[in-house]
Amino acid sequence: MSLTCVAGLGVSGTAVARALAGRGERVVVVESGGGERQLAAAAELSGRGVEVRLGPLSLPEGTTRLVTTGWAPHHPLIAAALSAGVEVIGEVELAWRLRPAEPAPWLALTGTNGKTTAVRMLTAMLTAAGHKAAAVGNVGVPVVEAVREPYDVLAVELSSFQLHWSATLAPHAAAVLNVAPDHLDWHGSMDAYAAAKGRVFERAGTVIYNADDPECARLAGPYPGAVGFTLRVPKPGQVGLVEDLLVDRAFVGDPVEAAEELATLADVRPLAPHNVANALAAAALARAFGVPAEAVRQGLRDFTPDPHRLAHVARVAEVDYVDDSKATNPHAAAAALASYPSIVWVAGGQLKGADVADLVSQAAPRLRGAVLLGADRARIAEALARHAPNVPVVDIEGQDTGVMDRVVTEASRLASPGDTVLLAPAGASLDMFPGYPARGEAFARAVRALEAGT
């Protein structure tokens, strides 16, 4: 019997092992961790006939296929499998291969930033149109589980990691929101990262791209009939903005002469340029699936933003405090900073090799102050000194739980009435927090403590 090795006991790895064991296949899961969570997952899988090996990683003898849940090609286990001629695929690719005879179509979406927001907007639009739909993939629900359920359509969020290990996906429609430097330590170069994003287009029925993003336009270039979305007035074959209206000139009977109103800017929450782009991308995917305009509008109205994405925490002494902890790279931080006119910026964390010079240069006219924390705060301080030398900067040392209290206190001292204190870190959070949600929650707690003390 052939043997599938599953790399990792996380949510996706466990789902893969369950799915394959349910098909009667021989599965071995390898996992380097041996904590309480891993032990519990191993016990559950063992009851299903899955062998779990905890400890030092090695490729099980006789492995014919390895399923990875996001591990990089240069990881020793993956490299060993590739050098041995073992097929390596990802959880999403496996899910595609395990679809039933009459599968639900996929509407796939990727991008450096905004993926989860856009895929949830899309799901709300599909639901408003009466379809049984689910947001799956990088949004948190393993695709390999969802494909076994009787959905009408799946809104699939895909990361560059997942796309790297996917070779045969053929979604009904696919969109790329934006492409900016991120995860270069995983992919090895910007070209490789962009190429992974572009794989979502290769077999898509309809290609949808951000016409305002040169890299997205380049990726869509080889595909005739690609549909662009834009924050400008749309050309024929695009969706875009006409004053305060979201307008479709692509999925209408005569794109040259006709246009259809989909929604208004008032229907988009939170209202910020990058979030309008998310709404347009979601609308284009929905329209590619035949969703009527009224359901696009209703879906936007029904959509509830996820936490830590331009979330307004409080107004204290006429200063707004906003949590955008999900801004874990410079591109996301730039979008957040462009949303407010006068900002005290809270930034720092793990930059993952990304450069922040352009970010600081573009944001400089909006900055009234900056408070820096985390592992790579010195690099942000250097960029501020070069590109915004008149902006006061407070450097907060330490990794203790009280750091965010000090950050918010210093930010409040820098802020004046009418300013926004914006947590948009531009870096990952794992130097100080379990994840970006914990960082955002710490910020919100500190703001509420400030509010209570005023």
Image (spheres, grey):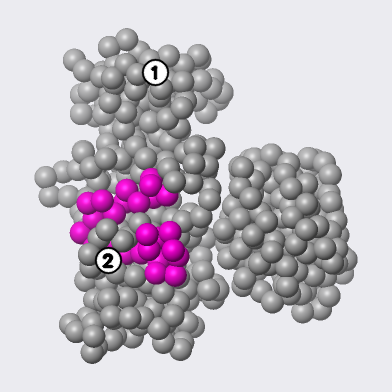
- Distance of label 1 from label 2 (alpha carbons): 39 Å
Residue at 43% x, 59% y is 215
Residue type at the position of mark 1:
Ala
Q: 252 left or right of 220?
A: left
Inspect this view and state whether residue 113 appears. Answer: yes
Mark sitting earlier along the chain (1/2): 1
Q: 49 left or right of 359?
A: left
The residue that label 1 is drawn on is 80
Residue at 25% x, 46% y is 169
Inspect this view and state whether residue 124 appears. Answer: no
Task: Inspect the magenta stretch and tell me whether residue 217 lies in it.
Answer: yes
Count of numbered labels shown in the rendering: 2
Q: Percent from the top left, x then y, of residue 86?
A: 29, 21
Q: Percent from the top left, x then y, of residue 321?
A: 72, 67
In-front residue for pair 18/64: 64
In-front residue for pair 63/232: 232
Residue 90 drawn above or below residue 319: above
Q: Percent from the top left, x then y, of residue 309?
A: 57, 62
Residue at 55% x, 73% y is 272
Circle 2 sits in a helix, a strand or a loop, which is it? loop
Which residue ends up furthest to the left in the rendered image?
Answer: 101
In-front residue for pair 207/423: 207
The residue that label 2 is drawn on is 226
Q: Quadrant of the N terminus?
A: top left
Q: Percent from the top left, x then y, of residue 47?
A: 34, 21
Task: Inspect the magenta stretch and tell me whether residue 439 lies in it.
Answer: no
Circle 1 sits in a helix, a strand or a loop, which is it? helix
- Residues in magenta, as a range: 194-218
Residue 26 drawn above or below residue 278: above
